[in-house]
Image (cartoon, rainbow, N blue to C red):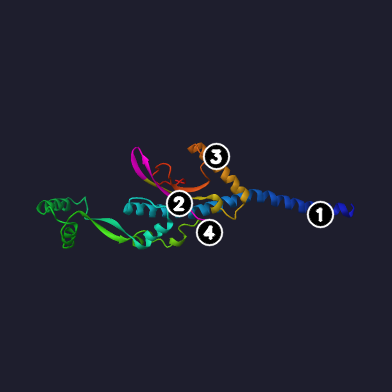
């Protein structure tokens, strides 16, 4: 056996087999890694969209509309108060219910504040009272991962902005405030395999075409400015 054959058999062929095996494994593992990272990033992005929805709903409760401005939403969180209805006593407590009815019959103009004073003095009553509480002391108070400054930014995108819009549409003769917030996979998956991301975009648009009759877009979205959807997310 000459030297060339030995080199081919003992060196080149094994290296070629190792290289081919590596390429095969990589071709299988790359999509797996892509999907794992996609799932991890989606989890962060979905939480951010949920936070936007929570703030938008609170803003609408106080202002009667949604906003398309992140600055307005941030200012609402840091500087505004919201009305919180607190129930005292239990509706299942028959004695408390009876006491409350008798008290209201005796004092028709009694205020919740006056009832609260009686409640604190030991009377068994059932009633609700409204409190004005700073938004920042109510929403996300126990959430250590909530960051107001990053609310408008697509996670992992190196600074891309989340799209947000708000409108008032007439639906069946009624004016309905609507909002939506969305981010694209192109921004969310920045830095990952571009071809796999392009393939994902194509499959998402095809799925949207079948499900909604329109290609729509490839990404995550909460709410809709085209039709009421109870501010649902497209991942729900």
- Residue 223 position, x and y percent, is 42, 47
- Residue 26 position, x and y percent, is 66, 51
Q: Which residue is located at x 17 percent, y 58 percent?
A: 115
Q: Secondary structure at mark 4?
A: loop
Badge 3 density bin: few <14, some 14–19, many ≥20, Cα 10 Å:
some
Residue 159, which numbered label? Answer: 4
Q: Secondary structure at mark 2?
A: strand
Give the residue number, with chain letter if any, for mark 3.
Answer: 206
167 within the magenta span: yes
Which badge, 4 or 2, is on the more N-terminal residue?
4
Q: CA distance from mark 2 to mark 3?
A: 24 Å
Q: Is residue 152 visible?
A: yes
Q: CA distance from mark 4 to mark 2?
A: 15 Å
Give the residue number, with chain letter if any, for mark 2.
Answer: 164
Q: CA distance from mark 2 to mark 1?
A: 62 Å
Please provide the residue range marked out in magenta. Answer: 157-176
Which badge, 2 or 1, is on the more N-terminal residue?
1
Q: Which one is nearer the viewer's eye here, 87 or 188?
A: 188
Q: Secondary structure at mark 3?
A: helix
């Amino acid at each position: 056996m000459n030297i060339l054959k030995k080199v081919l058999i003992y060196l080149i062929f094994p290296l070629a087999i190792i290289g081919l095996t590596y390429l095969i494994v990589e071709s299988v593992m790359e999509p797996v890694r892509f999907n794992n990272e996609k799932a991890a990033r989606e989890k962060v992005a979905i939480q951010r969209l949920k936070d936007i929805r929570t703030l938008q709903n609170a803003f609408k409760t106080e202002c009667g509309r949604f906003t398309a401005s992140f600055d307005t939403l941030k200012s609402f969180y840091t500087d505004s108060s919201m009305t919180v209805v607190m129930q005292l006593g239990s509706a299942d407590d028959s004695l408390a219910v009876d006491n409350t009815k008798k008290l209201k019959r005796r004092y028709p103009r009694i205020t919740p504040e006056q009832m609260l004073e009686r409640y604190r003095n030991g009377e068994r009553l059932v009633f609700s009272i409204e409190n004005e509480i700073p938004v920042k002391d109510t929403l996300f108070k126990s959430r250590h991962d909530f960051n107001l400054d990053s609310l408008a930014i697509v996670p992992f995108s190196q600074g891309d902005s989340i799209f947000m819009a708000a409108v008032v549409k007439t639906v069946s003769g009624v004016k309905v405030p609507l909002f939506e917030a969305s981010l694209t996979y192109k921004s969310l998956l920045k830095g990952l395999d571009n071809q796999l991301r392009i393939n994902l975009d194509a499959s998402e648009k095809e799925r949207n075409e079948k499900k909604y009759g329109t290609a729509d877009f490839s990404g995550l979205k909460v709410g809709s400015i085209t039709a009421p959807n109870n501010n649902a997310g497209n991942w729900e």
